Amino acid sequence: MSSTAAIPSAQVAQGFSSPGTERMPLMALEAMSPAQREAADALIAGPRKAVFGPFIPLLRSPELMNRIGKVGEYLRFESLLDARIRELVICRVARQVSNQFEWLMHAPLALQAGVQQSTLDAIAAGRQPRGMAADEAVALDFTSELLLQHGSSDATYAEALASFGEQGVVELTTLVGYFVMVCWVMNVARTPTQGKPDFEPLTAFPA
């Protein structure tokens, strides 16, 4: 990723191995059931202000969308974790599962929250970032271990506990799981996203 390389703000396809048309596009209002309309209205009235990203395919299951949306609202807007840590972790998850929507949404937010451009460039390239703040390094180690090993070693857990406390470790773990889940939903649905003029989308890792 580069903060200076401009790309058109056209749609960016989801996924690399089998690109294709969007499987679950945004439903027309007249095609929605009453429950789907109610769920869409609730999302628009909340902090997200629109039906977009994972909520486009999730609208097929309106009650599930409602419940997932509430969890996401807490994790994104109310968690005790600092915004800088939250955005960094979301970017690491997006890279792991190759999700363009979450990357292009949260990489700019990570920069605004104080994450260094060099850190995001390393994550985008699949490299271990260097020169991070201590709490960022702990969060990234914990997140990477969880994504790759499906758990946490005693040493990594102890560092995360010292940095974030028990509630923070629980919320950090849940944040990772939540964003893996919504990324998977979009990957399956091939939900595209709009390009950002100042941010490159993810590229596939070498085969």
Image: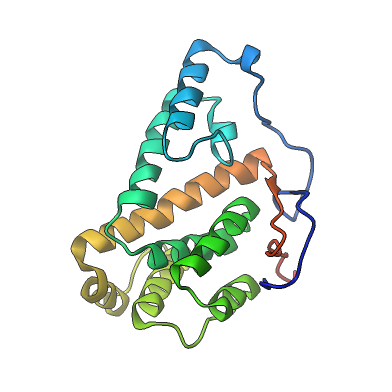
Image height of 63 relative to 70, above or below: above
* Residue 25 located left or right of residue 60: right
Q: Quadrant of residue 145?
A: bottom left
Image height of 60 relative to 154, above or below: above
Where residue 132 sits: x, y (%)? Answer: 44, 83
Question: If the image is split into quadrants, where does the N terminus sit?
Answer: bottom right
* Residue 105 located left or right of residue 76: right
Where residue 160 sits: x, y (%)? Answer: 28, 72
Q: Is residue 160 visible?
A: yes
* Residue 194 located left or right of residue 77: right
Q: What is the tally of numbered marks visible in this picture? A: 0
Residue at 48%, 73% in the rendered image: 115
Residue at 78%, 38% in the rendered image: 21
Question: If the image is split into quadrants, where does the C terminus sit?
Answer: bottom right
Residue at 28%, 80% in the rendered image: 155
Image height of 204 relative to 27, above or below: below
* Residue 30 located left or right of residue 72: right
Residue at 64%, 14% in the rendered image: 31
Where residue 3 sits: x, y (%)? Answer: 66, 72
